[in-house]
Amino acid sequence: MCADCEVPLIETPIEEEGAVSNAVPSGTVVPLWEGEDLALHTSLLEELDAAGIPYYAHPMGVFPGVRRGDHFPIQPMARFGYQLAVLSSNFSAGRLILERLLEERPQDVELPAQVEPTDSTPEAPARGDEELGNEIWTGQDDALFGFLRDALHENEIPLRMEALGSEKRVYVRASDALRAREIIREIIEAAPPQ
């Protein structure tokens, strides 16, 4: 009998048929998986939920405002990823789920090479003995003169430069003239190619 409310007490609780056990799993928390694969992380969480296995999931990484306790770490801290842990009593079941998911993962699939569009107007083949006689730019701006020289060199267009007093001129091969004029137009107008 209860001393406070005077209700008769029984020695053991009566278990109803079909009652769900409320047993609390026990054990220490042990790491199950860590990595950067978001798809695997999500699948693993879904499978653990479906199996009724409690877990602890934590994002890894360096985020603004996070302070590290160890100023001289032995191992570098990952910049992105997830850590997942389960109770030691559920570790073997969780490990089986993880192994099954890893076996089911598709292997890396190679992407097909993209075919680059070809220009409808083919350039005339450049010849090594072709004369650098097509004038593509004339001006007095020393800085622009040097910039054009560097841009054409970067695009592997041979050129000849002349400076007559304050006037400067840039010459290229006839086979490179169209491309060189387009590069100069992009530089002067600060506009991408059309």
Image (cartoon, helix red, strand yellow):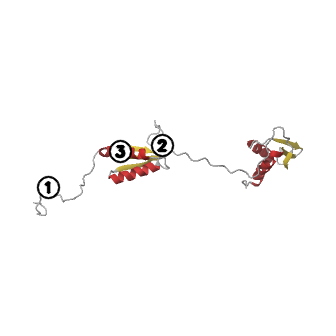
Task: Name the secondary structure under disc 1.
Answer: loop
Q: Residue flagged by tag 3: what amino acid is it?
A: Leu
Secondary structure at badge 3 equals helix
Q: Residue at x 58, y 47 (%)?
A: 112
Residue at 55% across, 45% down = 110
Q: Which mark is residue 96?
A: 3
- Residue at image coords 43%, 49%: 41
Q: Which residue is mark 1?
A: 12
Classify 10 Å Cα crowding around label 2: few (below 14), some (14-19), many (20 and above): few
Q: Nearer the viewer, residue 122 or 25?
A: 122
Q: Secondary structure at mark 2?
A: loop
Quarter of the image with the C terminus is bottom right
Q: State the separation of the CA atoms marked 1 and 2.
A: 52 Å
Q: Quadrant of residue 160?
A: top right
Look at the image and tell me whether residue 142 can be seen: no
117 displayed left or right of 129: left
Q: Please name which of the two marks, 3 or 1, marks the residue nearer to the observer.
A: 3
* Foreground residue among 99 and 81: 99
Q: Is residue 123 above or below residue 75?
A: below
The residue under label 1 is which amino acid type? Thr
Give the Cα separation between the discs numbered 3 and 1. 37 Å
In the image, is 78 to the left or to the right of 142?
left
Q: Return the disc, 1 or 2, that comes first in the chain's sequence.
A: 1
Query: Which label's residue is closer to the chain start, 3 or 1?
Result: 1
- Percent across and percent down for residue 25 are 27, 49
Residue 78: image tag: 2
